[in-house]
Amino acid sequence: MDYAAARKIMVDSQVRVNDVTDRALQAALQAAPRERFVPQDRAFSAYAEIEPVIAGDRRLMLARDLSKLLAAAEAQPGERALAIAAPYAASVLARLGLTVTAQEADASVFEVVGEVLAEEGVKTEVAPFDRPVGEGYDVIVSEAATPGRPQSWIEALAVGGRLVVVERSGPAGKAVLYIKGAQGVSRRELFDAAPPVLADLQPTPTFAL
């Protein structure tokens, strides 16, 4: 399979047509080897309009949705980014010139994607998703959904930092942009999306008599 050609087709048919017009972002998506973020025997699935499995219950986000999230984040070269459950996004951000840390709760994800992230200069950390590693980030992104407002992620942002994530409590979700200001946090809904919700962040069921 010609993966370079597949990347171009992906950008032309899934990214540009969804009003993602940033040329640098398009170039990063066309360069990042998405086929290396799934097991080798499923590399062919990386460019289809599906959410292919990385490992366990972790999946790649649709290229369309991720490109729109990253466009909203307006990431700039030299900024610091944290990619939570977002290894492919980490690769794209690194190619945009950011200093990137990729965080996973399940080390088996890095057994699949660790080599390519190391080649691209992305630092990897294994830690629970509700405890972001580090602080003072300019950009935080997730390829998975959260069941609500991820407060600990917002707290890990620098002033002026942006969090882009899908919040989902039912069959559909909303992609959201948070911007952390000196006096508070703003929230803007972006588009409908429905990636899988991070099971680690689901509230524990409680029962009352």
Image (cartoon, rainbow, N blue to C red):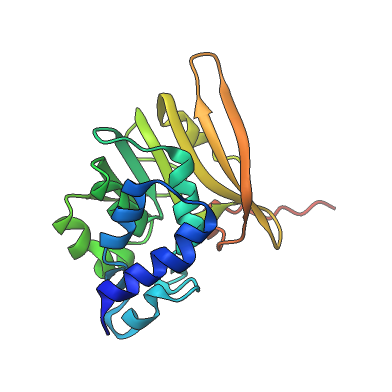
Residue 58 vertical placement versus 183 (above, below): below
Residue placed furthest toward the top:
183
**Can residue 3 be seen at all in this image of the molecule?**
yes
Quarter of the image where the N terminus is located: bottom left
Residue 197: x percent and y percent? 57, 59
Nearest the camera: 199 or 192? 192
Residue at 56% x, 63% y is 196
Residue 30: x percent and y percent? 30, 61
Q: Is residue 54 left or right of residue 65?
A: left
Residue 159 vertical placement versus 29 (above, below): above
Residue at 22% x, 50% y is 122
* Quadrant in which residue 184 is drawn: top right
Residue 96 vertical placement versus 55 (above, below): above
Residue 20: x percent and y percent? 47, 51
Nearest the camera: 193 or 130? 193
Residue placed furthest toward the right:
209
Residue at 23% x, 42% y is 97
